[in-house]
Amino acid sequence: MEFQRTIIWVVFGMSLVLLWDRWQVSQGHNAFFFPGITSNASKAPPSAPVAGAPASTESSTASAPPTAAASAVQDASIPGAEPKASAASGPVELVHIQTDLLHVDFDAQGAVLVRAELLQQDVASQWTAQGLAGFVTGKKPGPEEHVVLFDRSATREYLAQSGLIGGADSTSLPNHRSTRFDILPGPRALGEGQQELSVRFEAESGGVRLRKTFTFRRGRYDIEVRHEVENVGNEALAPSLYLQLTRDNGKTEEDSSFYKTYTGPAVYTDAEHFRKISFDDIAKHDAAQPKPADNGWLAMVQHYFLSAWIPATGVQREFYTRALSDRLFSVGAILPLGSIAPGAKATQQAVLYAGPQNQSKLEALAPGLDRVADYGWLDPIAKPLFWLLGFLYGIVGNWGWAIVLLTILIKIAFYPLAAAGFKSMARMKEVAPRLAKLKEQYGEDKQKLQVAMMELYKQEKINPLGGCLPILVQIPVFIALYWVLLGSVEMRNAPWILWIHDLATPDPWFVLPALMMLTSWIQYTLQPTPPDPVQAKMMMIMPFVFGVMFFFFPSGLVLYYVLNNGLSILQQWRINKVIAGAKPVG
C-alpha cells in the first residue's frame, strides 16, 4: 500500500510541476525543465573558425576541432555577411521552380536554395502549436497556406548551401557566399505529363568552373543534385565539395507549449548510427562529431519534417557543425574531390531531401534516414508499434480506425497482466472498509498498523503490490505509443469521423478531452479509495488535471487514451462484479 501511495504522489507531483512549467512557456517565460537554446547560445564564447569548413551567413565559431579531411584543404572562412543586395553583387535574383509537390526558390548568389514550400502539406492543421489559444482567438492559418521548410525572411533563416573550398584563398573557388551563378536556359516548371525537371546553375572562379544540376521528379520530395567541377586553369587543383544546411533555432509552427519535440541537426553513419546534435551543444562547443566515413548523411530535423543532404555511398566525407551566431547554426559535410588536372573534370552526386518524415520513403532513400522519426530509448518498442499501426491502416484505410484497432490489440495482448492488476485492486477495494477500521483501531501506532494490514492481506490472499506491478510492466508500451502517435507525420491532415478532420491537431470541440476526463474519473471510482483523506482528494482531482493537459494534445493521441480508458473500465467493472459475487466481504 505504501508503494502504491509513493507512485501516486510522484506521478501527481510531477504532473503538477510539468503543467506549471508548460504554462510558464505558454505565457512567454523561460521553461525551467526545457530552457530555450537561444539564451545558452548567446553566452557561447567566440572561437576561431574550423579549418576546411565553409562559413555561412554570419561570423562563425567552431564547434569541434578540424580533423584530417578538413585540415587537408585551406581555411574556407569567407568573411562578411550573407549577401542579399549590394553594389558588388547586384540585386537579389530569385529563380522560381514549380513541381507537383514543391515550390522552390533559388538565389543566384551562390545557387542557394532559400525557400521550399510543400504544396501538399497544409498549414491550416498546424494551430496545434498554439492549442486552446488558437481556438479562442480564432487566429488560425488560412486554408491556402502551406508548410514552408527552407525560408529566408525577417523571422526565419533556413537554407541549403553547397560550394567548393581549397583554392588559393578562401573566396577563390565558386561558393555560396561570394559567387554569383548563371541560370542556364531551360524550363522552370514541371509540365503536364512531365516526369522530371532539371535546373542548372553555372559559375567560374579561381580557375574552376562549377555546374550545379538540380533534378526534381514528379511525386517526390528528394532532389538529385549533381556537382560538376572542371579545372579551366593551368595548374592541378585538389578542391573539396561542401554540402551544408543552415538554420536558426527559432520555434516552428508545429511546436507546442505542452509537449516537446526535437528541433536541430542530426547525422548518421553506419558505424556510429543516428546522432542528434542539439543547437545548445553546438553553441557550447560540446558537439561530438562522427568520425570521417564513406557513408552517412546529415539533416535538420523538426516536428514532422526534415531536410537532409545525402552524399553518394562510397565517397569519403567529414561532418562538421558550427554556431554562426547566437541564433544561427549549420551542419555540413566536406567531400574531397581529389586532384583535378588542367582540363579534367570531377563529378559528385548527392540527394537533397526537403519534406515530411514519411518513414517508409525515407528508409528507401538512405540507411537510417527513417530514424529522424525519433522515439528515444523506447525506439525498439515504438518501431514495431508504428509498423503494426501502418499495417492496420492498410486494412481499414483510415488512421483513426487504425488507432482504434491498435488499442484493442494492445489491450488484448496485456489482458492477463491487466486482469491480475484489476483483480488485486478490486480485492483492495473490497477490504478498504476493514483497512479504515484498522487505522481507527491502532491510531498513530504505525508499526502495529502495518502488522495488522499485512495479516489482513495474508488472510484475504491479497498482494498489495499486485495492482502496481502489472501497470508498471505496461508503462513502456504506453509511452512508446504516445511518441508514435505524437510524432508520426502520417497523422497530419488525416481525418477520422465527424468533427475530427485532423488527428495531429487538438479536438476543435474538445469532445475527446472531455471524454478523457470522464473515463479517468470513472476509473478512479472503480479503484480502492486511499485511507488517507488528503491522498484521496488528490486522486480525485488527478483526472481533471490530466484532462486539462489533453485539451492541447493531438486528437489521435487523445483518442487512444479515451478508448484505452473505456476498455479498462469495462474490464475492471466485470472483475469487480465477479469478485463481489464470488466472495462478499463482511
Image (spheres, grey):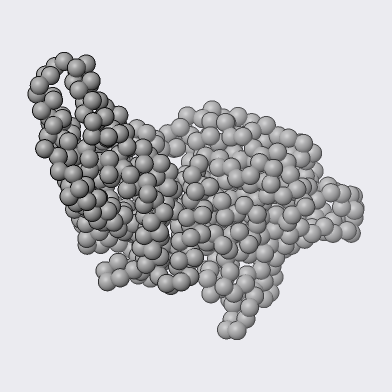
Image mark count: 0
Quarter of the figure with the C terminus: top left
Whether residue 193 appears in this view of the structure is yes
> Which residue sits at x=12%, y=34%?
433
Tell me the quarter of the picture where residue 421 sits. Answer: top left
Q: Position of residue 126 (x, y in %)?
A: 36, 59
Q: In the displayed structure, would residue 448 be above or below residue 96?
A: above
> Residue at the location (26% across, 29% down)?
458
Task: Residue 133: tell me if it is visible.
Answer: no
At x 70%, y 65%, the residue is 213
* Outermost residue, bottom side: 193
Is 227 positioned to the left or the right of 393 in the image? right
> Where on the picture, by quarter, is residue 185?
bottom right
Percent coordinates x, y for residue 351 in the rendering:
66, 60
Q: Is residue 32 above or below residue 228?
A: above
In the displayed structure image, the side of residue 324 where residue 122 appears, left or right: left
In the foreground, 48 or 277: 277
Viewer-proximal residue, 239 or 504?
Answer: 504
Looking at the picture, does residue 248 appear above or below residue 557? Answer: above
Q: Quadrant of the N terminus?
A: top left
Residue 552 image point, x, y percent: 29, 52
Q: Position of residue 441 (x, y in %)?
A: 10, 21
Please indicate whether residue 431 sits to the left or right of residue 26 in the image: left
Residue for point 65% across, 54% down:
367
* Residue 9 vs residue 429, the one in the foreground: 429
